[in-house]
Image: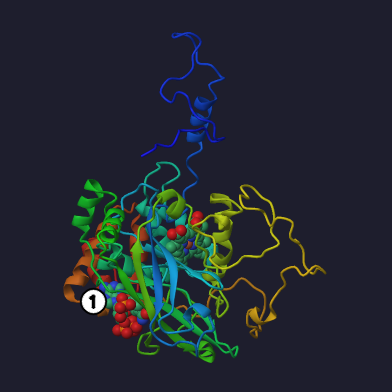
Amino acid sequence: MNKDNLTTSWGAPVGDNQNSMTAGSRGPTLIQDLHLLEKLAHFNRERVPERVVHAKGAGAHGYFEVTNDVTKYTKAKFLSEVGKRTPLFTRFSTVAGENGSADTVRDPRGFAVKFYTEEGNYDLVGNNTPVFFIRDAIKFPDFIHTQKRDPKTNLKNPTAVWDFWSLSPESLHQVTILMSDRGIPATYRHMNGYGSHTFKWVNAQGEAVWVKYHFKTEQGIKNLSTDVAAKFAGENPDYHTEELFNAIEKEDFPAWKVYVQVMPFEDANTYRYDPFDVTKVWSHKDYPLIEVGRMVLDRNPENYFAEVEQATFSPGAFVPGIEASPDKMLQGRLFAYADAHRYRVGVNHNHLPINRPLSAVHTNHRDGQMRFDSNGGGSINYEPNSFNGPSETPENKQTAFELSGFADSVSYDENDHYSQAGNLYRLLNEDERTRLVQNIVDAMKPVLKEEIKLKQIQHFYKADNEYGTRIAEGLGLAVHQEV
Ligand code: NDP
Ligand code: HEM
């Protein structure tokens, strides 16, 4: 087989890739060894900034197949017919660790899916938990600062973590999930995925409903005990990445059944929880799961950097028939991701093969760094125009909805942070409760201020008396709810 010639990036053949050019065999290196200069300079620029959160992850290609008719709820074309398949790319991740950190830590897992639909890319950027720690985007940078490294010690700081949580009681539900067995999935294949937020689906008649997505693993839920996870973190920090890759390589393709809960549009005004509050679930009894389809992952990336690192998922990448809800977290995310992508990958990130829609793209955006396609050639780049340029399609406008009230900085009206966390505690069996309590006690022990522990314990009490009592006892603190 003929080997390719090694070349420089400008395509010229390289004469020597082992010895740099020097002035005499013992003299200094010559600046005219342009291959050497290019090699060193390119190497210096190999890293792009890692994702500010969810830096460590693994990705895989696959497809989505519709298994149930949901056209009465949405006009999204990729959901229009039973049996219809849409290619997709999925990335799973941890949240707080750096790129290179251990996979088997106690942390939510990102569950991001990019559907390459015929109407553009639809990204669902969820987690393996149905709720989140906070419910207003304005708190996100502060929250993440407590999850990342301390500015002085550069160490993880449990005092900051519990200080923030104890002062943000809306976090209790997610803290309970995180500290439960599901806080450390056995693999990326053995966990569910949730869109977490409420989204709006709109049908061909323009009628809207609210939906929540659930991806249920067909492999079954499996988790790692804290001890085994710690062992893996030391012995094979890339365990989840490796496990997913190997399963797909062996053609043991992981799959998830995809469901939605559907809430009639008007119910949002009367439901007992604010349906846009991402710290709450909708009871399955109130809104049962409706099957939509099946996601299968059947192909590993060929190149990690090109496909996984450069993948850009945005909760704002919607297609007709799927829209945002007024969830205050989601609203912040609509801005944050595309902004991060412009910084992390570049303004033209959507031209990269992994992000490029399969459908035709006709924007009036031009130029910018790394515009590596034909940049629209000589085509018209403004609208309106008299030259038959691409034009808007009014049938694809987002649905209008009525609003009233004052522009103001206000919290959700709903401030019951305890019932659902308590419901979850009560749903666990005795062994699961014991492990949950132990995990919390171990995590809270290093907190430096007793006042923070006492504040947090009150939240556990308010969720469930037994829950609070067991944690207080585990920490050797005598507290009761009224303290
Ligand atoms: P349901 O009995 O209808 O739902 C309970 C759900 O809890 C199950 O379907 C399962 O969701 C989930 N679950 C079971 N064990 C665990 C665990 N160890 N850790 C986390 N989740 C678990 O009751 P409700 O809908 O009224 O919910 C009760 C509580 O269940 C909620 O307060 C919430 O904390 C939790 N939950 C609810 C979900 C929902 O969408 N309603 C989703 C996940 C958790 P799944 O099969 O999706 O994993
Ligand atoms: C990644 C911001 C809440 C799931 C990111 C990134 C940012 C970000 C900037 C990095 C994006 C990139 O560089 O490509 C925020 C903000 C939030 C928020 C501002 C709150 C206002 C959430 C919530 C979820 C979530 C609630 C899940 C329900 C994810 C996932 C990724 C991610 C899965 C990784 C995506 C990937 O694999 O590329 N987030 N986030 N985030 N976030 Fe969030």
Q: Quadrant of the N terminus?
A: top left
**Residue for badge 1:** 428
Q: Give the amino acid at mark 1.
A: Leu
In the displayed image of the protein, which residue is found farthest to the front?
1
Which quadrant of the structure image shows residue 411? bottom right
Q: How is the image coloured?
A: rainbow
What residue lies at 19% left-to-right and 56% top-to-bottom? 228
Q: Residue at 28% across / 53% down in the picture? A: 242
Quarter where residue 85 is shown: bottom left
Could you say which is closer to the camera, residue 243 or residue 101?
A: 243
Q: Report the front residue among 254 and 358.
A: 358
Q: Position of residue 255 (x, y in %)?
A: 31, 71
Q: Position of residue 345 (x, y in %)?
A: 54, 51
Q: Is residue 51 above or below residue 317?
A: above
**Residue 107 in the image: x percent, y percent?**
34, 60
Q: Secondary structure at mark 1?
A: loop
**Residue 478 makes an appearance in the image:** no
Count of numbered circles in the view: 1
User: Is the residue marked 1 within 8 Å of ligand 1, measured from its CB?
Assistant: yes
Residue situated furthest left in the rendering:
431
Q: Which residue occupies 23% across, 76% down?
A: 428
Residue 396 % position (x, y): 64, 79
Name the side, left or right, on which 83 lies relative to 77. left
- Badge 1: few (under 14), some or many (20 or more) residues near its Cα, within 10 Å? some
Q: Nearer the viewer, residue 246 or 165?
A: 246
- Horizontally, is 362 left or right of 59 in the view? right
In which quadrant is the C terminus drawn?
bottom left
Residue 144 visible to the viewer: yes
